[in-house]
Image (cartoon, rainbow, N blue to C red):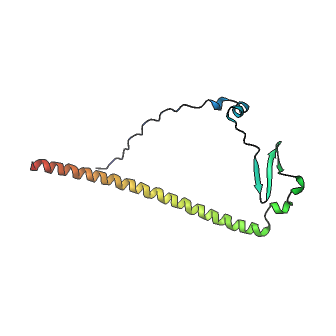
Amino acid sequence: LPFLFLPRRPPLRQITSLSSFYLLDHKTRQMELGLDYGLPQAQLSNAKFVFQDGKWQSEGSPTHQLPFRQLFPSSGQEQSNKVLKKENKALLEENNYLKLQLELLMDMLTDTTAQLHTVEKKLDLKFSKLSKRWQ
């Protein structure tokens, strides 16, 4: 007799009350909740940039800007970056392979557990029949 694995359905989730703040426009939300995040910032090497008026500008005085060459890697760094990218790709592929193996092992474990439960049920039925005969 093949065993059909039919797990129980999970209970339905309760509806949580949603906040009405998402209906407000940005300025009203900012006044109500005090959400002032400031300007978006980014850092490249030692240079800091701020996004103002639709453009990325260096933070601080314009005289304190780094030369263009210092913002981007040299050819030696590019080689090490290529090596790191290659290594990263190999690690990602290995990670995907290990995830696949884990999924396969979990499926095998689920199947074995289900088979064990059916064998236990059959044994329980046999022992209950035997115990009824002895009584």
Residue nearest the viewer, comparing 112 with 69: 69
The part of the image, by quadrant, that contains residue 53 is: top right
The reply, left or right, for residue 101 in relation to residue 117 is right
Residue nearest the viewer, comparing 15 with 109: 15
Question: Horizontal and vertical percent for residue 28?
Answer: 71, 30
Residue at the spot 87% in from the left edge and 52% down from the top edge: 61
The reply, left or right, for residue 55 in relation to residue 111 is right
Residue nearest the viewer, comparing 15 with 94: 15
How many numbered markers are drawn? 0
Question: Horizontal and vertical percent for residue 126?
Answer: 19, 51
Q: Residue furthest bottom?
A: 76
Can you say whether 121 is above or below 88 in the image?
above
Residue at the spot 74% in from the left edge and 69% down from the top edge: 79
Residue at the spot 54% in from the left edge and 31% down from the top edge: 17
Question: Horizontal and vertical percent for residue 112?
Answer: 35, 56
Residue at the spot 34% in from the left edge and 51% down from the top edge: 114
Can you say whether 74 is above or below 27 in the image?
below
The reply, left or right, for residue 9 in relation to residue 26 is left
The part of the image, by quadrant, that contains residue 86 is: bottom right
Question: Horizontal and vertical percent for residue 109?
Answer: 39, 56
The part of the image, by quadrant, that contains residue 89 is: bottom right
Q: Residue furthest right?
A: 63
